[in-house]
Amino acid sequence: MTGPAYAVLAGNIRARIVSGELAPGERLPNEQELSAEFGVGRSTVREALRSLASQDLIQTTRGVAGGSFVSVPTAAHLSAHLETGVALMAAAERVTVGQLMSLRHLLEVPAAGEAARHRTDEQLEDLRRAEFDPATAVGEATYAANQDFHLVLLRASGNPLLEVITAPLFRVLATRFGRDHAPDGFWACVADDHAELHDLVAARDADGAVTAMRRHLDHLTGAYQQMDRLSRG
Amino acid sequence: MTGPAYAVLAGNIRARIVSGELAPGERLPNEQELSAEFGVGRSTVREALRSLASQDLIQTTRGVAGGSFVSVPTAAHLSAHLETGVALMAAAERVTVGQLMSLRHLLEVPAAGEAARHRTDEQLEDLRRAEFDPATAVGEATYAANQDFHLVLLRASGNPLLEVITAPLFRVLATRFGRDHAPDGFWACVADDHAELHDLVAARDADGAVTAMRRHLDHLTGAYQQMDRLSRG
DNA sequence: CCCATCAAAGTGTCAGACGATTGGCGTCGT
DNA sequence: ACGACGCCAATCGTCTGACACTTTGATGGG
């Protein structure tokens, strides 16, 4: 009830959305109507709407059929928000590389097992496409492929939330260390690990995939912590 | 570069913040200066600022020493955002109760072990305070205490991110099922499990805590899925 | 020395106007 | 009859200017 009018209005509408009173896809009254309904100026209404839009609770379009529509946040939205937040917490040194990697262990090791159990042939193909040859691939493409491989594996696990909360973790690590000079043989090792994981997932060997992922993440942890020490002096 | 001016401006400032060019605590130019600097009206500037504020990237205060200040999102901020997002995904039936609980297993079971190893006496005291007596406690207080117990345990694990990503999961479950009629003996069972966990953490018995947490989450999973089936008919 | 009062710097809010975009509808030509 | 074209209305996007409210610090009187 307190605070600036735009915050009150945003809170009011947000409450209506999360409670389900406003269904996804539903259209909000236009800005003039909201302005009249709540007895505030249109600028105030717009500030409230921008607030909601940046949380992916609404989507606004122009034109005669335009307006603000209630929207369900997608996995990608949540993931992106979480990524910037985690990145800033990491930059503020409130989260260490070891903590990020230990979470990846908790999540990705079991995920590899689930992926081996539940993967479809299509997902297996996606996984193959995300592999790379360290001899020919260079630069940005390598980092992107590396991320894609883990992303596809998470997706194949069948639990969409797993992807939402894990992807930000390795994306933060990748942008943090992507441009640093990796130890000799690092990318070759990564390519080997990925190839092994691909084969185990192809063979639906859940136990093997779990073990391989654990070893792979250990490799990454070692390399990242080495780079971290170097960059800190 | 495309899109509405407020989005461009917000993206510009956001980039400066995440890149570290604008340090936490630093003050942005005031609205008039931003308006002049970017050649847009003040309303546009304000819409961009509301956008950033709702992502906890800036904080705005009034008064002569007021303005917009770069702020690092806290664990609570991230957690809250994630919670609304997960809640909406769950409401849209894109995430099941089983998937939420299986993530809790992945995260909270090892967290219980870490908490047993690293807990301080103070955290143990917090844990004790979060217990409740099912015979005397009633209603909302019970749900809140139940959540607090898990929250304190996660915090004691020593990895702040663990709390950030796990808390939204059980908060969503709690608000989803908190008001439903729980099976007979459910709360007594929860209280027993919590008491056992408390004792094991007090004794620094990591293996025991892991086992007890696994069992506790199994109890919760059973109860939640039963309530879920009932509520869906 | 303390307290009340005031000035200054900002954000918060409003009203009104006009531009930009989009989708529908009617018109016109074929 | 049908398709292309262009106009029109609805809605958001943006600007301007004004004033109110909040907070801090300075100032002056008791």
Image (cartoon, coloured by chain):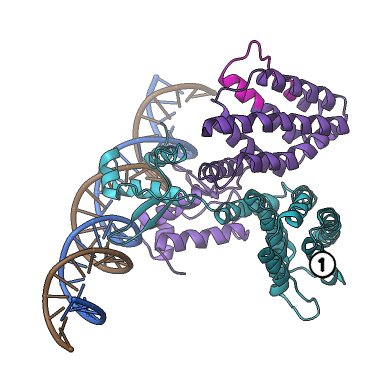
Chain colours: A cyan, B purple, C brown, D blue
Count the marks. 1
Quickly name the residue at label 1.
Answer: A190
Percent x, y of residue B58 = 53, 49
Crowding around mark 1 (Cα neighbors within 10 Å: few <14, some 14 to 19, many 20+) is many
Which residue appears farthest toward the top when viewing the image? B136
Q: Quadrant of residue A143?
A: bottom right
- Looking at numbered disc 1 in the image, what kind of residue is underneath it? Val
When the figure is inspected, residue B86 is found, relative to residue A126, above or below; the finding is: above
Q: Quadrant of the N terminus of chain A?
A: top left
Question: In this rendering, would D19 be left or right of A76?
Answer: left
Answer with left or right where residue A90 lies relative to residue B35. Answer: right
Q: Quadrant of residue B19?
A: bottom right
| Image quarter of the C terminus of chain A | bottom right
**On screen, B159 above or below A227?**
above
- Residues shaded magenta: B126-146
Q: Nearer the viewer, residue B81 or A119?
A: A119
Relative to D3, residue A217 above or below: above
- Give the residue at x 78% y 76%: A133
Circle 1 SS class: helix
Residue at (36% x, 52% y) in the render: A68
Return the x and y of residue A99 as percentages of the image width and height: 77, 48
Q: Residue at x 86, y 34 (%)?
A: B117
* Residue B127 included in the magenta stretch of the image: yes
Q: Return the x and y of residue B147 as percentages of the image width and height.
A: 65, 29
The residue closer to the viewer here, B124 or B177, is: B177
Chain label for disc 1: A
